[in-house]
Image (cartoon, helix red, strand yellow):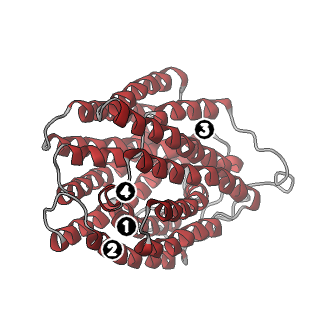
Amino acid sequence: MEQTSERKPILGLNPNVFYLGVVSFLTDVSSELIFTLMPLFLANVLGASTVIIGFISGVADSTASLTNIFSGWLSDRLSKRKWLSFFGYALSSLTKPFMLIASTWGPVMGIRFADRLGKGVRTAPRDALVADSTPEEVRGKAFGFHRAMDTGGAALGLLSAAIVVYFVQGSVLTLELKTYNWLIILGLIPAFLALLFFIPVQETGKEAASSSAGTARVSLPNKYKIFLAIMFLFTLGNSSDAFLILRAQDLGNDVLLITLMLVMFNVVYALFATPAGIVSDKLGRRTVIIVGWGIYALVYLGFALSNQPWAVWLLWALYGLYYGLSEGVARALVSDLVPEEARGTAYGWYHGTVGITLLPASLIAGWLWQSVNPAAPFYFGAALAAIAMVGMLMLIKK
């Protein structure tokens, strides 16, 4: 039977969920300061092509995904979620200072690889720990809160980045090196502060594997495998957000305006994540996810068709709504579809499938951008999202 901590709830949530939310909040403040404008650093400062940018993003995210598969399985075998997750956060924090000395795209790829390796180590055990700490009837709320904290940190990090851009370079269209260096320096502070908030996090005490399960293969239900196949299809058209940033600049928005758009995106995401989770607890995960994917398809069509700088503001706001409706709810659905003893493995394969697919998705998007036109990747993404919605409607019953 699943065991949860008897500690006093914080904001109506298990303390593990609250403190892991704070860790994610601070980590995202750091990551958004340092890495969100990295595509512009690569393009504007280092002169990298969109194919290289797509390659770096795809390799980094695929690395995180492959590692997720192993770390999720290991957390089930060892029944140790906390320390695997802590190690992943620590690895990412120790990697970030090296961005200050990167002068070509090769070292940037290496740094981003190490940072995403840390993400791969931490994500599946962390999500399994959130699920272990929460009863099913409020699991959507718990994952929604975690996504809201994560995204609230992103909003604060991006707002801080916008302030830095304003005071260091003003409304210059392209990103300057001195601006990016200041973003890195400021981003290191919350990266290391986040590690302190792991201290109150506790293992749930649930034995995720029996004495014989450590050597046995964990069986995952067919309905979960079908969901993974649908996620693969959807993600194949969901290339790196670097292309959305480049598209915004391509339509005439300067670095400061792009940063403010990203702040708005994360605020919208944070505002809708917890309510979406609560709604999914009552009405079902599938319905909420399908609505979110429908909004995503419309957003990508908008990025393809738009030719006005102001339209990008609306599209980024709707993109935040998509994330708020879909991300936390999809993670709660994973927990609903698998037995307790397989949660770490299930989250590993979930994040692994999504991330591995990001490499071909980003390479396809980069090729379509250069070989066809900048709108082509977005038509492709919208089409695959529509097909994935049909798959969810017909094949996922829960």
Which numbered disc, 2 or 4, marks the residue closer to the eye?
Answer: 2
Q: Quadrant of residue 64?
A: bottom right
Q: Choose the circle earlier in sequence order: 1 or 4.
A: 1
Closest to the observer, 318 or 162: 162
- The numbered mark, 2 or 4, whose residue comes first in the sequence reads 4
The residue that label 3 is drawn on is 337
Residue 217 place in picture, x, y as percent: 80, 44
Amino acid type of the residue tagged 2 in the rendering: Asn
Q: Which of marks 1 and 4 is in front?
A: 1
**Residue 332 in sight here:** no
Residue at the image point whose x is 44% and y is 79% from the top: 193
* Secondary element type, mark 2: helix
Residue picked out by circle 4: 148
* Alpha carbon distance from label 2 to label 4: 28 Å
* Residue at image mark 2: 181
Is label 3 in a helix, a strand or a loop? Answer: helix
Cα distance between the residues tagged 1 and 2 = 9 Å
The residue shown at (50%, 73%) is 93
* Residue 34, percent from left and from top: 37, 67
Q: Name the residue under label 1.
A: 34
Q: Residue 24: x and y, percent?
A: 44, 65
